[in-house]
Image (cartoon, rainbow, N blue to C red):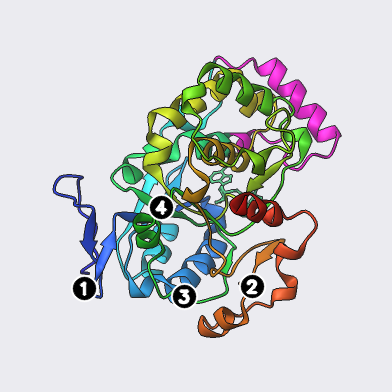
Amino acid sequence: HPGTAPASTEGLSEYELGSNGTRRANAVLLMLVRNSELEGALRSVTQLEDRFNHLFGYPWVFLNEVPFTDEFKEKMSAAIAGPVSFGLIPKEDWYQPGWIDEEKAAASRAQMEANNVVYGGSVSYRNMCRFNSGFFYRHPLAQRYKWYWRVEPGVSFHCDTDYDPFLFMEEHDKVYGFTISLQEWPPTVPTLWDAVKEYIAANPQHVAPNNSMAFLSDDGGNSYNMCHFWSNFEIANMEFWRGEVYSKFFEHLESKGGFYYERWGDAPVHSIGAALFARKDQIHFFDDIGYQHPPFMHCPRLHSVRQERNCSCTQYQSFDNNMYSCLRKWEQVVRS
Ligand code: GDP
Ligand code: MN
């Protein structure tokens, strides 16, 4: 296959040639997934291949904290024309660290479970959120790439993407791309914003000029308004996560233990990182990518786009119109 990824970073240039002979970005389609989710994973992959990747042949990488089964690898490889790799996550990047006070963590899980917080009692969900917040981009199979498109099992892509969104990001100096934004459940992040404020106070030089603090806070940074980009879809630059600023920020959050003592999600953590440490013009709303992760869906707003891209979604069901969407706030911030 002409789109085969190189085996090492040696000789890897910024752009490679794609399967159609055109310039292509140093990018990967990335899915963290369990063996038990094979069916939903195949649906997501098949749709993205049909709607986008058959034109480009970008490589897929699948990650898991336990080895993928032969069935998973065989069926997935058969569904994808281009390069596919399956990676095991190092134990220390996944499991609850030994320095976490398990008694305190268990008490918090029990409390959240009693309060019916979604995944409130789950340790594996917390492992996943911490891994996605601070580790996935350092996995050996992800390390060689700059750009990634995060894909989850059971999602739908409702429109054709006939241009290269990675090259779009590259050429417009973007860092982070999203389709859906919404409000976090406050009980999952009671002290996250305190940790963020502490970090900013200690590292004011890290905060970007022309950032989007106004997306996160309605009172100039005093409190968090719970707005975040929904991270089950992301097209973003891993070098931003790997850089000194976000790395130090993640280490600070990690030191608080909030991934286990509370239930900090990778969505608010990435969103806060992107909104404070990148300029607001470096964050891109992919209005033209129709995307659904149940229970929410984004459908392109313009009728002409829906027609040109053969979209199979309807605008009136788009989450953009929902009162819990943060899109209006995002667009105010961009215009201000
Ligand atoms: P939700 O979208 O917040 O409801 O969470 P999901 O259950 O969809 O998990 C988010 C992503 O992490 C999905 O890609 C899942 O396949 C993956 N994931 C969640 N928990 C685990 C786990 O324990 N192991 C692995 N390998 N993947 C997981
Ligand atoms: Mn999900």
Q: Residue at x 46, y 75 (%)?
A: 51
Q: Are marks 4 and 2 in contact (CB under 8 Å)?
A: no
Q: Are discs 2 and 3 less than 8 Å apart at CB? A: no
Q: Position of residue 179 (x, y in %)?
A: 58, 59
Residue 62 point in image, percent of width and height = 42, 52
> Residues in magenta?
99-126
Q: Residue at x 73, y 55 (%)?
A: 325
Which tag, 2 or 3, sits closer to the chain's start? Answer: 3
Q: Which x, y percent locates residue 114?
A: 85, 33
C-alpha gap between disc 1 and disc 4: 21 Å
User: Counting residues from the N terminus, which is met first, the one under dot 1 or under dot 2?
Assistant: 1
Mark 3 surroundings within 10 Å by alpha-carbon count, few (fewer than 14), some (14 through 19), many (20 or more): some
Name the magenta segment's main secondary structure. helix
Kindly report the distance in space between the C-alpha atoms of the residues bearing marks 1 and 2.
32 Å
Left or right of 274: which side holds 169? left
Residue at the spot of label 2: 301
Residue 158 vertical position relative to residue 286 in the rendered view, above or below: below
SS assignment at label 2: loop
Disc with the residue nearer the chain's start (4 vs 2): 4
Question: Which of labels 2 and 3 is toward the front?
Answer: 2
110 is within the stretch colored magenta = yes
In the image, what residue type sits under mark 1? Gly
Name the amino acid, label 3. Arg
Which residue does the numbered mark 1 point to in the structure image?
21
Q: Which mark is residue 148?
A: 4
Which of the pair 1/316 is nearer the observer?
A: 316
Q: Say which label, 3 or 4, has the lower sequence index.
A: 3
Q: Which residue is mark 3?
A: 51
